[in-house]
Image: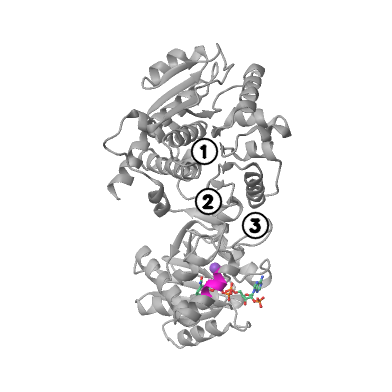
Amino acid sequence: MKIFTSPQIRKCDAFTIENEPVTSLALMERAATACAGWLSRKFSGETVYNIFCGHGNNGGDGFALARLLYHKGCDVNVFMDSAQNLSADAEINFKRTKDISGIEFSDFSKVNKFQFEKESVIIDALFGTGLNNAIEGKSAELIKVLNELKFPKISIDIPSGLFADEVSDKNSVVFKADETLSFQFWKKAFLHAETGQFCGKINILDIGLSSEFIENEISDSFVIDEGLVREIYRPRQEFSHKGNFGKTVIAAGSSGKMGAAVLATQAALKTGSGLTFSLAPQCGYEILQTTCPEAMFLKCGQDFITSFEVDQDVILGIGPGLGTERETYNALLAFLKACDKTLVLDADALNVIAENTDHVNLIPKKSILTPHPKEFERLFGTTENSFERLNLAKDKAKQLEIYIVLKDHHTQIATPEGKVFYNLTGNSGMAKGGSGDVLLGILTSLLAQNYSVKEAALFGVWLHGKAGDFAAENHSKEAMIPSDLIAELGNVFKYLNSSQ
Ligand SMILES: NC(=O)C1=CN([C@@H]2O[C@H](COP(=O)(O)OP(=O)(O)OC[C@H]3O[C@@H](n4cnc5c(N)ncnc54)[C@H](OP(=O)(O)O)[C@@H]3O)[C@@H](O)[C@H]2O)[C@H](O)CC1
Ligand SMILES: [K+]
C-alpha cells in the first residue's frame, strides 16, 4: 500500500471530489461514519464520548462524529474553542450538531476542571493533517491536561501535534492516543519511533477515496501489507525435488558464539531451503551437527572462521557470531574483494565493513544488509533522528545498489531504486539477541529458493515479524525467545496456504 504525504492526501481529496461525484462534506460524513462504526464496535453502549473539536476539518469530523454517535444512542459531550472561526465544512457540521438538545457543548478554555463520567472516552479531533506549526496556547494547555487523564484516548486521523510526514520538535505538545483512527492511508508519522509513540494502535479506515488517483499517484514509500506478501509468496510445487529449492550457506559462529550459527541455520531450514550448509569453525561441529542434523557442515577454521570460500551455486548469508578475530576479518575482506554475487550481510560482517569507509564499496551489488540502528551508524554515519536515518539509508541503497534492511519497530527496507517499504508485522518481544540471526537465515533461504532480492527482502522481513507475532500470542512478548520465531515459521506458511 502506498504512503502519501499530507499534500498528496489533499490532492487525493480534491481529485475524488472532482471526479467521483462526491462533495467534501460527503467525504467528511464518510470519515465520521467510519469512526462512529469503529467506536461503537469497540466500546460498550454505556460509554460517554467526550469529543474535542478544533476549527479545521479535523474538528469538522469531530462535530459530525458527535451527531452520528448521538443518533446511535450514545452519550456525547463536545468541547471546542468558540473564539475560533470554523472551516466551511466544520461550520456546517457544527450547525447540524449544535441544536441537538441531548449533546452538551462547552468551551474548553472555560472549563476549570474536567469532570468526566466513569465510562468516558476522550476523542481528539483538534488538529489533523492541516497542522503547520507546533501547537501553542489554549490548545496546548488542553492537550497537556487530557494526556494526564486515565480514560481511553482516541485520535481522529492523527494525534494532534504530529505532522504526517516529519518528526516533531522534541518539546512540542502532542496528544497521546491509545488508538488512532486514520483515513485510507498509513502516514510516515505512524511508523517512526519518535512520532509513532504518540499514536497507539493504528486503524486505517477506508473512506472510498479515488482508486484512480491512488493507482496513478507516484510515491516512493509503501507499507508491506498482506496483499503484497501474497503476491510474492510462491507455494511449493508438488512435482519438485530438493534441487529446486536452492543451496543456502550460513557462514556464522566462533568459539562461544555458536548459538548464532544454530539460530540462522535452523531458520534457513524452516524457511524451505533445499540444501542447507553451516560454514563454521571446527569448534561448532558437534553443536551444529546435533542441533541442525538436516544441515551439512563446512569446516573453515578451528575456533573462528578463516575462509569464506564456497561453490558458485550457493547463496551465502554471513555474519552472526563471527567474532572479532583479525584473521576472520581479513578472510572476509579478501572474500568480498573477489565476490560479485548477492550476499546477505549482518552483525560482525557489517562491523568488518564499518572499519573503513572504503569497505562499503566492496559490498557486491544487490546484496542485502540488515543493520540495527547502531550498526547502521557505524557503517554510514550518525543522524539526528529516524526520519533522517532513513533518508541516509535511501541515499546509500541507491548509491551502492544494495538493499538496506533497517531493523526497527517497523523495519524499513531501502531499495536501489530509491523506494522504502515499511514492515507492519513484529513486536517488542523480538527485541532480543538472536532475532537478527533468525532474519539472516530466513533471507538467505528465500534467495536460495530463487525469490528476487527485492521479493526476498520484503517477504523475509514480513515472515520474521509474523512469526514473532505468533510467538507473542503463544508465549507472551516477555517470554518468547528467537527460537520460538523459528518454531512459528511453519504456522506462518500454513497461514499463507490456508487463507489463499
Ligand atoms: N481524505 C481525508 O483524509 C479526509 C480528511 N478529513 C479531515 O480533514 C483533516 C484536515 O483538515 P484541515 O482543515 O486541512 O486541517 P486541520 O483540521 O488539521 O486544521 C488545521 C487548522 O488549524 C490551523 N492551524 C494549523 N496549524 C496550527 C497551529 N499550530 N496552531 C493553530 N492553528 C493551526 C490551520 O489554519 P491555517 O490558516 O493556519 O492553515 C487549519 O485551519 C484531516 O486530518 C481529516 O481529519 C476530511 O474530513 C475527510 C477527508
Ligand atoms: K486529531
Sequence-first disc among 1 and 3 = 3
Q: Amino acid at mark 2?
A: Phe
Q: Amino acid at mark 3?
A: Val
Q: Which residue is found at the position 52% from the left and 48% from the top?
A: 410
Question: Which portion, as a residue range, is magenta?
Answer: 9-13
Check whether the beta carbons of the residues at disc 2 and disc 1 lie within 8 A of each other.
Answer: no
Give the number of the disc on residue 294.
none
Kindly report which numbered mark, 2 or 1, lies closer to the viewer in this rendering: 2
Q: CA distance from mark 2 to mark 3?
A: 18 Å
Residue underneath mark 2 = 421
Q: Secondary structure at mark 2?
A: strand
Is residue 8 shown left or right of residue 428? right
Would residue 12 be counted in the magenta stretch? yes
Residue underneath mark 3 = 167
Q: Secondary structure at mark 3?
A: loop
Would residue 182 be counted in the magenta stretch? no
- Residue 87 placement (x, y as % from top left): 58, 82
Q: Residues within 10 Å of mark 1 (few under 14, many from 20)?
A: some
Sequence-first disc among 2 and 1 = 2
The secondary structure that dominates the magenta segment is helix
Residue underneath mark 1 = 431
Give the colour scheme shown: one colour
Q: Residue 136 falls in which quadrant of the image? A: bottom right
Q: CA distance from mark 2 to mark 1?
A: 20 Å
Answer with the quadrant where ligand 1 appears in the image: bottom right
- Residue 423 placement (x, y as % from top left): 49, 49
